[in-house]
Image (cartoon, rainbow, N blue to C red):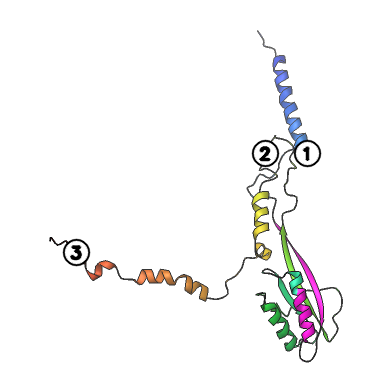
Amino acid sequence: MTKSLFPAAPKAAGTILALSIGLALSGCGGMPTNRSINSINQPVVERVNYTLDVNTGSGGLSIPEQRRLSGWFEAMDIRYGDRISIDDPLRSPSTMAAIDALAARYGLQVSDVAPTTVGYVDAGTARVVITRSKATVPNCPNWSARSDVNLGNATSTNFGCATNGNLAAMVADPEHLIKGAKGDSQTVVMSSTKAISSYREEAPTGERGLTESGSKED
């Protein structure tokens, strides 16, 4: 007695149809493809340069030019994370000192190495450059996977958008997403371990003996 193989045909056909639909969805972006735990939605840091040309002299910047530069700093709302640099063909120490004094009011330092900008800086003119960075996460939210089918056990296409988006929005200096901040000196390390050293060097209280205490009856 032989058993027919035809009853199994509908089941095999259904399996092939399901695989075909899954492959079709994966080809048109229907299924996520990232099988690692590393998010494909990463912050991107962009830099923008803003420039202002000021007139210089033998004594650096005149009072009107200092006021104009100070007003530009205030209008640009310079803050922590901004980088200020000077493009001065004469490399005048007086000009550098004057601009550095204005930037110090906002807690920023000035660099004499400026990025490349459009145009030529003539002698007797200095170009002040503010480099500002911005961090964003492109294509977020990312709901490009339009199917619940996940044959590859991959992470969601939106995975990482919330965490990295909040990190990009809250970081004080977006440049730290590229390269972390470094300590200024050894002083920070020494002061942070001062409390630990005091705790370790303190003698145990038992070495001084136990204090006597008692009660007196009236």
For this view, does 194 lie left or right of residue 211? right
Pointer 3 or 2: first along the chain: 2
Q: Which residue is mark 1?
A: 27
Q: Which residue is mark 3?
A: 213
CA distance for labels 2 and 1: 13 Å
Under tag 1, what secondary structure?
helix
Magenta-tinted stretch: 43-72
- Looking at the image, residue 100 lies above or below residue 192: below
User: Residue 73: x percent and y percent?
Assistant: 74, 74
Depth check: give the residue in front, 45 or 170: 170
- Looking at the image, residue 64 lies above or below residue 175: below
User: Residue 179: x percent and y percent?
Assistant: 65, 65
Q: Could you tell me which quadrant the N terminus lies in? A: top right
CA distance for labels 3 and 2: 74 Å
Q: Quadrant of residue 17?
A: top right
Name the residue type under label 1. Answer: Gly
Name the residue type under label 2. Answer: Gly
Depth check: give the residue in front, 167 or 56: 56
Q: Which residue is mark 2?
A: 152
For this view, does 114 lie left or right of residue 205? right
Packing grade of label 3 (10 A; few <14, some 14-19, many >=20) is few
Depth check: give the residue in front, 196 or 19: 196
Pointer 1 or 3: first along the chain: 1
Name the residue type under label 3. Answer: Ser
Asked if one can make out residue 114 in the rendered structure from this viewpoint, the answer is no
